[in-house]
Amino acid sequence: MNNASTWKLPTPIRHKLSELRGLISRVIATQGLVVLLTWLLGSFFVFGLIDYLPTRFGSEESPRIVRVIMLMIIAAGAAWILHHFFWNRWLVSWSDSALALAIERRYPEFQSTLVTAVQAASPTAKFQAKDLDAIEHPNRPGMIELAAKQAVEKISSIDVRSLVRLSTLQLELGILAGVVCLTGLGAMLHPDLASHWAKRLYGLSDAPWPRRTSLSVQGLEMDVPPFTNSPARERYLVRIEENRLLAPKGSSVRLKATAKDLLSEPYDQCAFHYKDRAGNRGRASMLSYSNANPRDFILDGPPL
C-alpha cells in the first residue's frame, strides 16, 4: 500500500532552493563559455605562430592540408567542450532533495530539519504499508511543522554563493583574460598579420606570408665595349623596362639583384630560378659580397 505526501514546502525554502539551482546553472554556462572562448582564441593564436614562424627563418608556407588539419582539431576541441561542459552538465537534474543535502553538508546546524521538510514535500515521497502507523501517528504532522519552522529560520541567512566552488571558474577566467590580452595585443600591433592568418586558416587562402626581406632584380651588368678605349674593365647596368631586358647575343653579362631589410645573418645567397624559350628549367645561386642594406647579389655564370 502506498500513500503520497501532501506536505507543501514553505515558500522561503522553495525560493532558496531555486536561487541555488539558478546559481549552479549560471556557473555551468559561464564555465563552458569561458573554456570555449579560451580554446578558440588560444588555438587561433598558437596555430598562427606555428604557421608563421617557420617563414621567418626562410621556410616555405605550410600546405593547405596542414591548415585543414588545424581546422579539424579546432572543431573537434570545440565539439568536446560543448559536449562536456554543456550537454553532459545540463542533463544533470538538481532535485530539491539533492540541493537540501548540499546545504546541510555545508551548514550542519540544520540538523536534518531542511532535508526532512524537503523530503516530506516531495511528490515522489512514498511510504510502504509497514510505515503507515508512523504516517498516521497524530504527532507526525507536528514534527514536520517543527522541522520546517526551524529550517525556515536558518535558511534566510544562507548565502548560496558559499555552496558553489568558484575557484576553478576564477582560474579559467584568468586564463581567458591572458589569452585575450595576448591575441588583442598581437591584433593591435600587427593587424595585417592577424587578418592574413584568418584568411589562410578559415578561408584556406594560399597567399604567402609577407616577408621583411624585399627582393628586386636591378638588371644586367654588361662590359663596356672595347672600342671606347677605356683603360679599365668597366661595366654598365641595363635596367629592366616593362618586364623586358635585351642584351646582345654572345655578350658577357651578369644579373644584379638587391635584398633590403634582411631578417638575420647570414643571408649571403639567393636562389635564381629560370626557364628558357626551349622550356628548359634550372636554378642558380646568386652570391653577395657586401653587407650593405640594400645588399647586392650577383649571378656571374650559367645560364647567362
Image (cartoon, rainbow, N blue to C red):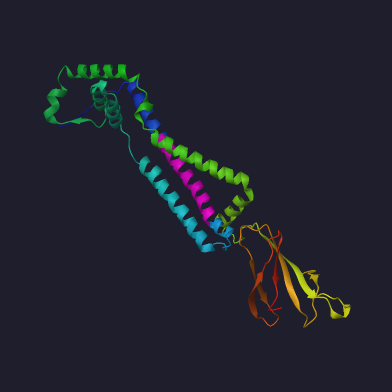
Where is residue 290? Give x, y as percent. 69, 64
The residue that appears at 34% across and 27% down in the rendered structure is: 17
Residue 296 in view of the camera: yes
Q: Nearer the viewer, residue 228 or 150?
A: 228
The residue that appears at 36% across and 41% down in the rendered structure is: 89
The image quadrant where one finds the C terminus is bottom right
Where is residue 84? Give x, y as percent. 38, 45
Residue 75 in the image: above or below residue 227: above
Where is residue 193? Give x, y as percent. 61, 52
Residue 81 falls within the magenta-colored stretch: no
Residue 34 falls within the magenta-colored stretch: yes
Q: On the picture, is 6 further left or further right than 294?
A: left
| Number of disc labels | 0
Residue at the limit of the structure toward the right, as seen here: 228
Q: Nearer the viewer, residue 204 or 297?
A: 297
What range is drawn magenta here?
27-50
Q: Nearer the viewer, residue 267 or 175?
A: 267
The image quarter in which residue 283 lies: bottom right
Residue 253 in the image: above or below residue 257: below
Residue 105 in the image: above or below residue 230: above
Which secondary structure class fits the magenta region best?
A: helix
Residue 29 in view of the camera: no
The residue that appears at 47% across and 56% down in the rendered structure is: 72
